[in-house]
Image (cartoon, rainbow, N blue to C red):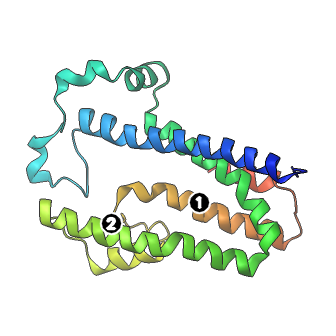
Amino acid sequence: MKWGTKGMASERLRYLDFLRGIAVILVMAGHFIDVATWGTEIPGVIHPNNIGMLPITPTDTQQYWRTSVFLVDSGGVQNAIVGVVFFFILTGYFIPDSLNHYGRKKFLINRFFRIFPTLWVCMIIDGIVVYILQGIQFSINTWLLTMCGLWKVFNVAPVSGVLWTLDIELLFLIKSIMCRYIGLQSTVLPYIFYMSQ
C-alpha cells in the first residue's frame, strides 16, 4: 500500500513500531516468566549437573503471571510465541516490499549486515557467559555452523536455542528471492510460504 503523504507514512510506521514494541515485551516476558518460572531444563544454558537450580523464580510466584497462565491454559501457547508470531507477520509484510524496492543484490547485502554481525556478537557473548557460569562448551563445528547460519542444514544444535526463529527468517528470505527471480512480484505468495514454515 502506498501512502500519499509523509505524515501518513510516519503514522503507519509508528503503528508498526507499536506492534514491534508489544512483540518485544511478549518475547522478553515469555523468556523471563515461562522459562524462569516453569522451566525444568534449559539445554545449552543450564548445565545438566545444575538442573536443581531450576526453576529460577520461586514457584509460589506463578499465580502473579496471569497472562502467561491464561495463554498456556486456554490456548497452549506462551507469551514469547505470540510475540514471535507478531515479528513473523511484520517480516512477511515488509520483506517483499524491501526486495522490490532495493533489488536482489542490495537487498541481500542489507540483510546480511542486519543479521550476521549481530548474530556473531550475541553468540560470542552467549558462549562466553554459559561457559563461565555453567561450564558449557561447544565444538568448533557448532560454532562455525552457528556463525554461518547453517546449523539447521547440518542438523546441529546451535550455540543458542533461541535461533530457531532465525531459521524461519532465512528460509523466508531465500523463498522471497526465488519468487522475485521467477517473476512473482506479489507480496502474497512469499508471505504464504513464510507463514507455512
Q: How many dots with numbers?
A: 2
Q: Quadrant of residue 97?
A: bottom right
Q: Is residue 6 above or below residue 178?
A: above
Q: Residue furthest front?
A: 7
Q: Which residue is located at x 20 percent, y 62 percent?
A: 130
**Left or right position of 121 against 167:** left
Mark positioned earlier in the residue sequence (2 or 1): 2
Q: Is residue 10 above or below residue 44?
A: above
Task: Return the x and y of residue 39 as percentages of the image width and height.
Answer: 25, 38
User: SS for tag 1?
Assistant: helix
- Amino acid residing under circle 2: Val
Q: Residues within 10 Å of mark 1 (few under 14, many from 20)?
A: some
Task: Return the x and y of residue 26 as percentages of the image width and height.
Answer: 46, 38
**Left or right position of 141 against 116:** left
Q: Which residue is mark 1?
A: 169
Q: Which residue is located at x 26 percent, y 33 percent?
A: 38
Q: Quadrant of residue 67?
A: top left
Q: Is residue 28 above or below residue 155?
A: above
Q: Which residue is mark 2?
A: 159
Q: Nearer the viewer, residue 26 or 6?
A: 6
Q: Nearer the viewer, residue 30 or 151?
A: 30
Task: Return the x and y of residue 92 as percentages of the image width and height.
Answer: 69, 52
User: SS for tag 2?
Assistant: loop
- Amino acid residing under circle 1: Glu
Task: Return the x and y of residue 51 as percentages of the image width and height.
Answer: 13, 45
Q: Residues within 10 Å of mark 2 (few under 14, many from 20)?
A: many
What separation in Å lies between label 2 and label 1 (alpha carbons)? 18 Å
Q: Which residue is located at x 74 percent, y 44 percent?
A: 11
**Left or right position of 120 against 176:** left
Q: Nearer the viewer, residue 139 or 4?
A: 4
